[in-house]
Amino acid sequence: RFNIYRLATMPKYEGFDFWKITLKGARYIVAPMVDQSELAWRLLSRRHGAQLCYTPMLHAQVFVRDANYRKENLYHEVNAEDRPLVVQFCANNPEVFVQASLLAQDYCDAIDLNLGCPQMIAKRGHYGAFLQEEWDLLLKMISEAHEKISVPITCKIRVFPEINKTVKYAKMLEKAGCQLLTVHGRTKEQKGPLTGVANWEHIKAVRKSVNIPVFANGNIQYLSDVERCFQETDVQGVMSAEGNLHNPALFEGKKPPVWEITEEYLEIVKQHRCPLSFVRAHLFKLWHHTLQIHHELREELAKVKSLEAIAEVNKRLKRKCQKEEDRENSLPFPHWICQPYVRPGPKEVTSENGDQQTDRKTCGKRALEEEEGNSEFLSKNKQKKKARNPKKNFDTSVKPKYVKCEQCGNPKGTKCIFNLCRGCCKKKAFKELADCAGHGLLFRTKHEKRLEWKLIEDGILENGDKIESHLD
Ligand SMILES: Cc1cc2nc3c(=O)[nH]c(=O)nc-3n(C[C@H](O)[C@H](O)[C@H](O)COP(=O)(O)O)c2cc1C
């Protein structure tokens, strides 16, 4: 059993010593991935060559506030095989970042600050890449955490369009106390269908200008890309997200059949449970190319509700593919071999069945374009709705704007008698002992009923008498 207390006494190494000693000179790294870099996946990846893993991004504020969140996302995932491990947080407040890091420091080898998430959710929550311009705040967050936390603080960033600014940014983070920098060679705007290729020139320039280890991220689909990246950028490590999801044996330079890796993954999940939605999402990625051929398996995978049922679908997939293997073993790149998925350009994105949509995730759930209702790039759910109702318009610019609650600005209930949202209406109706039929809130009616019943019981009121005179 892993002894968490051992870590508390471990020295806190910095910079290159931290990378060499604590991280054991890790060169092959699995990226932080919301809903996808869970313990079971990390263990699978480690068995196939990954030398360092990151947890999915955790919300520092929720981590501090919610003991269950801490247990589910970290404390119950502690595993001796799962080291070295970096815990990643999103945060925008020094105090909260320090508090969260204090609560996580005994369960990991470093704490990473997410400065790369480009999604709308990060824009709204004011974290990730949307802190890219807030250097004073970042300086404070990182320096305070560096001072108070017993493990090193690292950062994962996106680049600016200008190399000079990217280098200045990296140096600022280093000065603040960041002990290792992961540079994702794409800008904040390169996401969803605009993802495009990562720029290794920026990464190379950062690597040259800082005196802390640098990991490169972006454009890694095969082991040959990893090697080329080392040569071209001279970084200490290379991190993969989507490449790893499509082929967890990427760092081993192997391309196993998808059913084989699925069997192995399901065995690990049996021991280290995770939500079925994570498993399903993994298999949609792993099986991506096979599902283009065997559409019926897509339906089956979408419907099954247990690990055992998923294992059965995998067996069917195996049988189908093995039959093809016998017939078509001359194919250079059969669909059942773990292989990368090449992102389509903006024009190719809206395929008829919407398959490619799922692969446009870059960090978290939905790409910005979807959230902002850009009708050219509909989410899967919206595509289903559109199939049912082709006339429905998803373009938010022509949608009527909702009417705001007079108190909080959230959408108001359309039939609310106070012109409020449900939450505000409930508070007001409770306080004023009023009814709002629009929200189905009947505080006054219920009060009257209770009173009537009590008055009858006390013999003050006869059954059928009016109670108005007794009110208030
Ligand atoms: C499903 C998914 C979830 C992700 N979640 C995170 C996250 O939690 N934190 C983060 O810093 N980046 C996240 N990313 C971004 C990746 O870590 C990585 O920076 C990005 O995908 C580029 O690397 P790649 O070209 O190897 O995919 C996520 C990416 C994917 C595909």
Image (cartoon, rainbow, N blue to C red):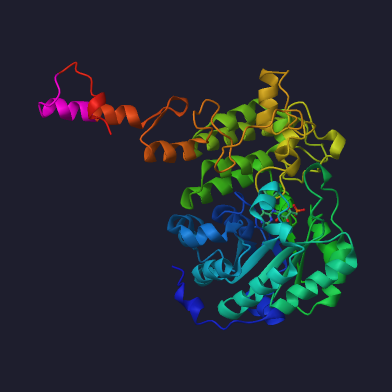
Give me the residue at 86% from left, 62% from top.
Answer: 200
Residue 70, image x, y percentages: 48, 59
Considering every residue shown, the one lying at the far left of the view is 459
On screen, residue 414 versus residue 368, left or right, reads left
Q: On the picture, is 209 further left or further right than 105?
A: right
Q: Can residue 161 be seen in this view?
A: yes
Q: Which of 354 and 29 is in front in this view?
A: 354
> Which residue is at the front of the view, 339 or 175?
175
x and y, in percent, of residue 193 in the image: 81, 42
Residue 471 vs 241, above or below: the answer is: above
Magenta stretch holds residue 460: yes
Above or below, 367 against 211 in this view is above
Q: Would residue 184 appear left or right of 468 to someone viewing this image?
A: right
The residue positioned 51% from the left and 45% from the top of the image is: 275
In this view of the protein, can residue 252 be seen by the observer?
A: no
Task: Tell me the quadrant of the picture where the N terminus can be found.
Answer: bottom left
Residue segment shown in magenta: 451-462
* Quarter where residue 207 is shown: bottom right
Residue 233 horizontal/vertical position (percent) = 86, 68
Q: Look at 16% across and 28% down and name the residue there.
A: 455
